Image: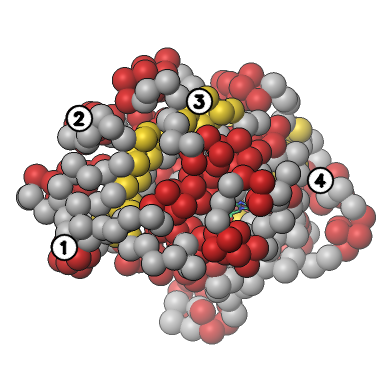
Amino acid sequence: MSFKELGLSPEILKAVEECGYSEPTPIQAQAIPVILMGRDVVGLAQTGTGKTAGFTLPMIEILAGGRAKARMPRSLILTPTRELAAQIAENFDMYGKHHKLTKALLVGGVSMEEQVKKLDRGVDVLIATPGRMLDLFERGKILMTDIKILVIDEADRMLDMGFIPDIKKIVSLLSPLRQTLLFSATMSPEIRKLTERFLSNPKEITVARQGTASAGVEQFLVEASPRAKQGVLGQIIEAEDVQNAFIFCNRKRDIDGLTRFLQGKGYAARPLHGDMPQSARSETLERFKAGEATLLVCSDVAARGLDVQGLSHVFNYDVPFNAEDYVHRVGRTGRAGMKGRAWTLATPAEQKYVEAIERLTGKAIERKTGAFSGMKAGASSSSQKEEKPSNIVKYNKKSDNKDTGEKTSKRTKQADRDSRDGPALKGFGDEMPEFFRK
Ligand code: AMP
């Protein structure tokens, strides 16, 4: 199947070709012709499947034939997070580069003034998080009556985040004569109810779960007590050929501490969580994309929708409470046919979440236990890879520590103690997990 067969115009085909895509992904192949026909669509697809282009490409096609009026956007895309909204906006820029469509991003955490100015000039595509969207509507800055296409992206995440009442309100303000596209990673009874309420005779398209789609991701599980987790993670990162990685924590309060721990070990680690101002989040992401930061310690919400090409690893510092989140997290690596590795650290108390994940994916995660110091040989799939030194960017520890004399001397004492245990155990001290001592 080629993009040419989907009914897209030469301008869009050109943009797609410039992105280097040779053929549509399954969700694109199935959704694009149906959306172009004007039908409602429920897309059961996760991030990483190419779903964003699956709806942006036909939207550009449909919207190309009209003009935006002041304060009356012609289409609306609702997303759960600012990052996902920014990602979709980037997609519009990429795929719509040979069109003259206008767009506005309505997300919290940035100045409303600029957003209002754009709306006043008229936009074809409005990409919004539900809270900010309603806020501007209530201030009389948006008229919803001209919205002909509504996209609800990551509906299951919206549900988790408590956005459904806002979405219901927004949908009630729209014309019933609209086309609605709803995307969700899963189809729970709640999502089913929403589709029945918001969509009319939709075509349901399901693409393979990330767990089966991302066959390129090798997945491992290591048991560690809560106290040992930092040390175990450090050890794995040291042993693996990590180019860049997301490290997921369940709790925001762990993110900063873990980031400091990794920075202390010389890694270019940065935190990313929902409490950071938008400007800091954007800067972190830019640095990560530029390779200046190689480890992003993040929460699920902050990382949702982030599209970083060529991520070599994902680490689950905690087992996610929700099995679906595991699939999302792991799906951040091994994208677009590339190889990736995902490591999960689990305490005995987290075993029940591991079982839920395995029930969902229908696959056991490979355990790495016992003589963990032999992990490198056991974990790597090719002996050539084992020989490679870690490529990860490290800060220059010396210059980094020049103002922290006390810390450095503590660390030196620790290093002296550690050197007695052999180099592989350096830095863990009392935190050293049991199986490292074997
Ligand atoms: P998404 O699932 O929308 O987050 O997209 C995942 C990634 O796949 C993004 O980096 C896209 O740029 C990329 N992508 C989308 N469509 C294609 C395609 N047809 N061929 C190759 N990569 C694609």
The residue under label 2 is 172
Per the rendering, the mark at residue 379 is 4
Crowd class of label 4 (few under 14; some 14 to 19; many from 20; radius 10 Å): many
Mark 3 → mark 2, Cα distance in angstroms? 22 Å
420 left or right of 311 in image: right
Q: Nearer the viewer, mark 3 or mark 4?
A: 3
Mark 2 → mark 1, Cα distance in angstroms? 23 Å
Q: Earlier in the sequence, mark 4 or mark 1?
A: 1
Q: How far across and down, in percent of the image, does residue 250 sit?
A: 45, 40
The residue under label 3 is 203
Secondary structure under the numbered disc 3 in the rendered image: strand
Depth check: give the residue in front, 212 or 415: 212
Tell me: residue 59, above or below residue 277.
above
Depth check: give the residue in front, 274 or 437: 274
The residue depicted at 61 percent of the width and 45 percent of the height is 6
Per the rendering, the mark at residue 120 is 1
Crowd class of label 2 (few under 14; some 14 to 19; many from 20; radius 10 Å): few
Secondary structure under the numbered disc 4 in the rendered image: helix
Circle 4: residue type: Ala
Mark 3 → mark 4, Cα distance in angstroms? 43 Å
Q: Earlier in the sequence, mark 2 or mark 1?
A: 1
Q: How far across and down, in percent of the image, does residue 406 sit?
A: 46, 74
Q: Nearer the viewer, mark 4 or mark 1?
A: 1
Circle 2: residue type: Ser
Circle 3: residue type: Lys
